[in-house]
């Protein structure tokens, strides 16, 4: 039981002050298992609930560095930025804002250029690992699918019932100009820490 002065409601946030501080949006309190991220809702972490006291990672701004993506087969470590516009893709890979962040249940979509951060994607195989490291944990995915779709195919960004990482780059890899297709890597979460 908390004393009256230990519990405060400030701007829609519930703060419990004292030995521990816990911050959740009202949407999270009313709908357990989801956390607000602007206009989107992020489901709970795939292997553990959102228990971090600092939840700034739920609200990245365009251009924020949100993760690193390690691709052991290619011996690559790629920085992942929030947003998929020209500015973010010049720096590294870009996280599609309409998708959940890496490590969360649902589909986290990351795009990159075929001639820079996602070069050599043709060497990837089913069973290869993809490791994302974020401020809130490390998440290991295993590649379960590799496919080519049309450049306007939006089925790669659909919601999923499990934690999925989807990587997208232009295809064919050596095409000159705006490529007509996309190479899609689908991976499922196998481990988190």
Image (cartoon, helix red, strand yellow):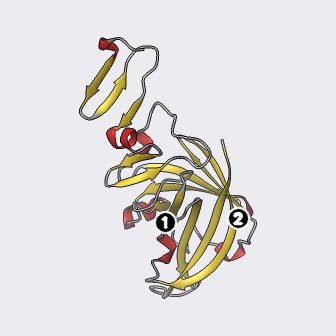
Q: Nearer the viewer, mark 2 or mark 1?
A: 1
In the rendered image, the vertical position of residue 140 relative to residue 187, given as above or below = above
In the rendered image, the vertical position of residue 101 relative to residue 57, given as above or below = below
Percent position of residue 140, x then y: 67, 53
Left or right relative to 56: residue 49: right
One can see residue 116 in this view: no
Circle 1 residue: 159
Q: In which quarter of the image is the C terminus?
A: top right
Q: Distance between the residues labelled 2 and 1?
A: 28 Å
Locate residue 9: give its quadrant. Answer: top left
Q: Which of 178 and 11 is in front in this view?
A: 11
Which residue is most to the left? 11
Left or right relative to 189: residue 1: left
Mark 1: secondary structure: loop
Percent position of residue 157, x then y: 48, 70
Residue at 51 percent across and 56 percent down: it is: 80
In the rendered image, the vertical position of residue 78 relative to residue 169, given as above or below = above
Residue at 37 percent across and 66 percent down: it is: 85
Percent position of residue 134, x then y: 55, 45
Percent position of residue 141, x then y: 67, 58
Q: In which quarter of the image is the N terminus?
A: top left
């Amino acid at each position: 039981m908390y004393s009256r002065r230990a519990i405060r409601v400030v701007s829609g946030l519930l703060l419990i002050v004292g030995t521990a501080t816990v911050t959740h949006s009202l949407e999270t309190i009313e709908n357990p298992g989801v956390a607000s991220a602007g206009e989107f809702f992020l489901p709970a972490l795939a292997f553990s609930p959102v228990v971090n006291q600092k939840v700034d990672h739920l609200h990245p701004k365009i251009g924020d560095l949100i993760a690193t993506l390690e691709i052991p087969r290619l011996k690559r470590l790629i920085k992942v930025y929030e947003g998929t516009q020209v500015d973010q893709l010049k720096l590294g890979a870009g996280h599609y804002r309409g998708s959940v962040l890496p490590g969360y249940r649902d589909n986290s979509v990351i795009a990159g250029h075929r001639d820079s951060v996602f070069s050599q994607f043709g060497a990837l195989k089913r069973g290869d690992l993809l490791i994302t490291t974020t401020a809130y944990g490390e998440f290991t995915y295993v590649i379960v699918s590799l496919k080519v779709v049309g450049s306007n195919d939006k089925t790669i960004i659909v919601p999923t019932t499990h934690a999925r990482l989807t990587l997208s780059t232009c295809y064919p890899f050596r095409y000159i100009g705006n490529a007509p297709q996309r190479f899609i890597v689908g991976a499922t979460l196998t481990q988190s820490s």
